[in-house]
Amino acid sequence: MEKDFDAIVVGGGLAGLAAAYTIADAGLEVLLLERGDYSGAKNVTGGRLYLNPVREMFPDLWEKAPLERFIAHEELSIMDKERSITVRYDGAELVQAPYQSYSILRGKFDRWFAKQAEKKGVAIVNKNRVDDLIIENGKVEGVRAGGEDLTAHVVVACDGVLSLLAEKAGLRKPGVPQDHAVGFKEIIELDRTTIEDRFNLEGDEGAARLFMGEVTRGKFGGGFLYTNKESVSLGIVVGIKDLMEEPMVQAPDLLDAFKLRPEIARLIKGGETSEYSAHVIPEGGYNSLSKLYGSGILLAGDAAGFSMNIGVTVRGMEYALASGYYAAQAVIKAKEADNFESETLAVYEKLLNESFVMTDFKNFKDAPRVMENPRFFQHYPQLAGNVMKDLYEVPAGSKARIYPTVKKYLTFGEMWAMFKDFRGVKKI
Amino acid sequence: MSELMGLKAKLGLDVFKHDKEAHIKIKPGMEKDPRLKRAVWVCPAGLYSENDQGEVELTIDGCLECGTCRIACGIEVLEWNYPNGGCGVQFRFG
Ligand SMILES: Cc1cc2nc3c(=O)[nH]c(=O)nc-3n(C[C@H](O)[C@H](O)[C@H](O)COP(=O)(O)OP(=O)(O)OC[C@H]3O[C@@H](n4cnc5c(N)ncnc54)[C@H](O)[C@@H]3O)c2cc1C
Ligand code: SF4
């Protein structure tokens, strides 16, 4: 049957752009439909992009890409109510080109990536919401958008975490709270020199700071701060299931309280908030991935569940780029075979299995369950804070001896509980 | 200290394009459903509230299209879709 296109990609986020770019590069006809005014208009990330896993998939892309700062300094803070402990990491490898990771703003990056995809020959139509799939005899034959039917040999659904299309195709059920987190953040503008002074940065160096504990009131998740060229991205990620449970707190209040913490307030002082955004994140891991393909359809990126949250750090962008790339390879192979049935498209899963994507998801299979343990987000931050307080405190009288101070907190019961908690961690 | 701005003011910083219809609706008869009450806590834009009669109300202006209410409350109580193409929030930074 004649088709309007070889492939229709739904969603111009990282997965969709990666897929369309790669399909067009192989000379196939591809249409990308995006519901926003432009690519990136609906997309939110933390965010930090790790380049190493995806550098070679898009060799021409990185040199001119609008990335913000390369991450040269890492910090992790464990927060209790009135105190925090911070570990800072500086390493020679972080400041050597090619750099490992960059801060990134999706409004800028996705928009630019879309231009590069157009140069490769992708037809992009923005402001176009796909409403339905055209399914005939169990095979996806195209999409319905704006009252129009558009046909293709294969549809690549890259419509993000909720993937209404994957639901329509019967590849997944509506998402549930325990498999998802919500992230919300502010872009706070500060001038270059202020950022460089406050975070001790030289030139294009950037800082990544993660926070756990009181920042989410002990709920699963954490806070993040990334420096961009002329702003910082400050936000919170918290498990939706935890947010629905005691102690009840309204999501936006977490971010306000975070901004008032003295550790944060001094970093953003004088800054002007210029945007507030929010987005759901899939975090169920390997066991919650969707079925990845069907007859005439492939799922990539968040739509398939390819995002991982192991407590304080979320990774989804590399997986979106890589799964989009492998979905494209499957489309190219199907075109060669002139067969777009699921048996042919199954090569997608095989390619993913052989790549870092599935290896990571299998290795971190138990992470969501282990990290669900609320003690990591409440009890340990408190314990660590108290030990440090006692160690540093010099009271009016004599100072307590160090060993009994530490021992006071590390009772037998505590050590046994710790042993059990950290035995779980070994699975990660 | 950095001064806090209210949620309304924060949402006022974002670019929104008006849609001709609300893209998320509370299903008729579900206003008092306990599942819907979760939205009051989880919505990052604070768009859900409970009135004196114990009914949950939704103001769609300011929706960030994040999807949290769909996940938390479910589609038995919410009719949930994205806005029409080219409508709704348009992030400049994301
Ligand atoms: C607060 C936060 C912090 C994060 N931090 C990090 C981080 O530091 N590092 C990291 O790697 N990952 C991070 N992530 C995860 C990462 O952002 C996502 O995994 C990634 O954006 C997924 O890309 P995607 O292309 O699959 O989906 P998206 O970027 O969501 O793109 C989906 C696209 O589909 C479009 N669309 C949806 N439905 C339709 C339709 N019906 N018709 C037409 N178009 C449609 C949307 O408009 C959108 O453009 C974070 C996420 C959040 C929310
Ligand atoms: S999609 Fe997000 S911002 Fe919009 S109403 Fe639902 S929870 Fe609130």
Image (cartoon, coloured by chain):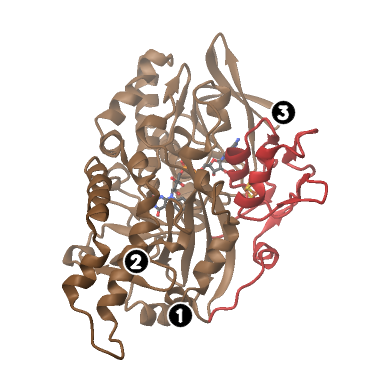
Tell which subunit mark 2 falls on.
Answer: A
Q: Which residue of the protein is positioned furthest toward the right in this rendering? A: B53
Q: Earlier in the sequence, mark 2 or mark 3?
A: 2
Tell if the residue under mark 1 belongs to the same chain as the one under mark 3. yes
The colour applied to the residues of chain A in this rendering is: brown
The amino acid on which the numbered mark 3 sits, given as a three-letter code, is Gly
Left or right: residue B33 versus residue A76 is right
Tell which subunit mark 1 falls on.
Answer: A
Front residue (pair A405, A157)? A405
Q: Secondary structure at mark 3?
A: loop
The amino acid on which the numbered mark 2 sits, given as a three-letter code, is Ser
- Above or below, A74 relative to A378: below
* Disc 1 from disc 2: Cα separation: 15 Å
Q: Residue at x 25, y 37 (%)?
A: A363
Q: Which mark is residue A147?
A: 3
Which residue is denoted by mark 1 in the rendering? Answer: A266
The colour applied to the residues of chain B in this rendering is: red
Q: Position of residue A2 (x, y in %)?
A: 55, 15
Q: Residue at x 62, y 54 (%)?
A: B90
Question: How busy is the neighbourhood of tag 3: few (under 14 within 10 Å), some, or many (20 plus)?
Answer: few
